[in-house]
């Protein structure tokens, strides 16, 4: 059987799990956000089964195709200040690639120094910004996403993953055992019996090559976990070097240098009312977003 696995970056660990679980089937994986429509359409046309995050892909006719949807993963509670920063010439890259810290950007925009900005990463500030109350909201969204793709227990899976400990690298990058659970659910829905039911025991997590966000101690304690204010930068594939482990102050200092050099950097997350409240509570003036 020929199976096409489509989706965002999460499709990579998923297809690795499925290839291990179903070695007698041919797996073709494409990033539906990056591949050309004609390439996607060809993969769908040749497949017996399509496993995808959506059946509404521009330029691709999925009429009559056996399709199994799987969820778009995201979990903000463990990395609540992860945000996007743009500049006049496009999306701005941080020391970790695309992910930025809204709190670091706030500190830079407010004219705080590195030490004062590092001092913002504490429970009182997290409470003020609503970071400590994200779990219920996230689980509600998981119920909606689960309903969309036909996985009624997705919110329950999130709870079980959280009970196992830290289960994300960044907001949209789950650890391998998460994608293995999703792969098992897919196999069950398709009536396919895995030859290897526990692929996470044998595979390297491909997401480890990417960025890893810090699990701040005051966030970790909310969920009974142990945290630390350290980040990992992405591996450099071109030079074949591993990413570096950097602490919070180095992350902030490097982020500040990036913002200093950028043309009109802006962060939508810091335009929320909670950041205005934070600005006022600190006695700051001027633009924040």
Image: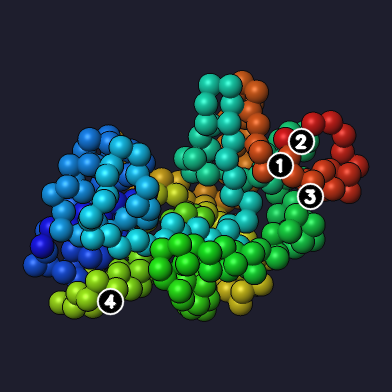
Q: Quadrant of residue 189?
A: bottom left
Residue ID for mark 2: 288
Q: Is residue 266 left or right of residue 168?
A: right
- Location of residue 282 in the rendering, given as x and y in whole percent from the top left corner: 87, 46
x 79%, y 46%: residue: 273
Please report whichever mark, 2 or 3, sits nearer to the chain's N-terminal start: 3
Identify the mark at residue 274; answer none if there is no mark. Answer: 3
Please report whichever mark, 4 or 1, sits nearer to the chain's N-terminal start: 4
Residue ID for mark 1: 270
Pick whichever, 241 or 176, lies toward us: 176
Q: Is residue 186 left or right of residue 215?
A: left
Please report whichever mark, 2 or 1, sits nearer to the chain's N-terminal start: 1
Q: Quadrant of residue 27?
A: bottom left
- Location of residue 95 in the rendering, given as x and y in whole percent from the top left corner: 51, 40
Cβ atoms under marks 2 and 3 closer than 8 Å: no
x 65%, y 23%: residue: 264
- Location of residue 186 in the rendering, given as x and y in whole percent from the top left corner: 30, 69
Cβ atoms under marks 2 and 1 closer than 8 Å: yes
Question: How much space separates mark 2 and mark 1, taking CA atoms?
Answer: 6 Å
Question: How much space separates mark 4 and mark 3, taking CA atoms?
Answer: 43 Å
- Check disc 3: other Cα within 10 Å, few if <14, some if 14-19, many if 20+: some
Question: How much space separates mark 2 and mark 3, taking CA atoms?
Answer: 11 Å
Residue ID for mark 4: 188
Please report whichever mark, 4 or 2, sits nearer to the chain's N-terminal start: 4
Q: Nearer the viewer, mark 4 or mark 2?
A: 4
């Amino acid at each position: 059987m020929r199976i096409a696995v489509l989706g965002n970056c999460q499709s990579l660990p998923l297809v690795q799990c499925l290839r291990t679980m179903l070695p007698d089937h041919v797996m073709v994986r494409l990033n539906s956000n990056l591949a050309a429509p004609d390439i996607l359409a060809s993969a769908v046309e040749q497949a017996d089964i399509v496993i995808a995050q959506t059946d509404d892909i521009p330029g691709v006719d999925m009429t009559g195709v056996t399709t199994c949807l799987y969820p778009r993963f995201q979990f903000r509670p463990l990395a609540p200040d992860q945000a996007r920063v743009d500049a006049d010439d496009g999306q701005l890259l941080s020391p970790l690639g695309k992910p930025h810290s809204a709190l670091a950007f706030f500190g830079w925009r407010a004219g705080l120094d590195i030490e004062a900005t590092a001092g913002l990463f504490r429970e009182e500030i997290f409470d003020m910004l609503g970071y400590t109350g994200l779990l219920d909201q996230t689980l509600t969204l998981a119920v909606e996403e689960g309903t969309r793709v036909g996985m009624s227990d997705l919110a329950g899976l999130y709870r079980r993953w959280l009970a196992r400990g830290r289960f994300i690298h960044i907001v949209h990058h789950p650890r391998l055992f998460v994608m293995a659970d999703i792969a098992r659910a897919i196999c069950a829905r398709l009536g396919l019996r895995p030859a290897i039911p526990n692929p996470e025991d044998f595979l390297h997590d491909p997401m480890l090559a990417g960025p890893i966000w810090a699990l701040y101690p005051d966030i970790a304690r909310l969920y009974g976990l142990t945290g630390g204010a350290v980040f990992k930068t992405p591996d450099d594939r071109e030079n074949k070097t591993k990413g570096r482990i950097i602490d919070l102050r180095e992350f902030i200092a490097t982020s500040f240098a990036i913002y200093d050099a950028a043309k009109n950097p802006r962060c939508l997350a810091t335009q929320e009312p909670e950041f205005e409240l934070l600005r006022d509570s600190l006695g700051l003036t001027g633009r924040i977003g």
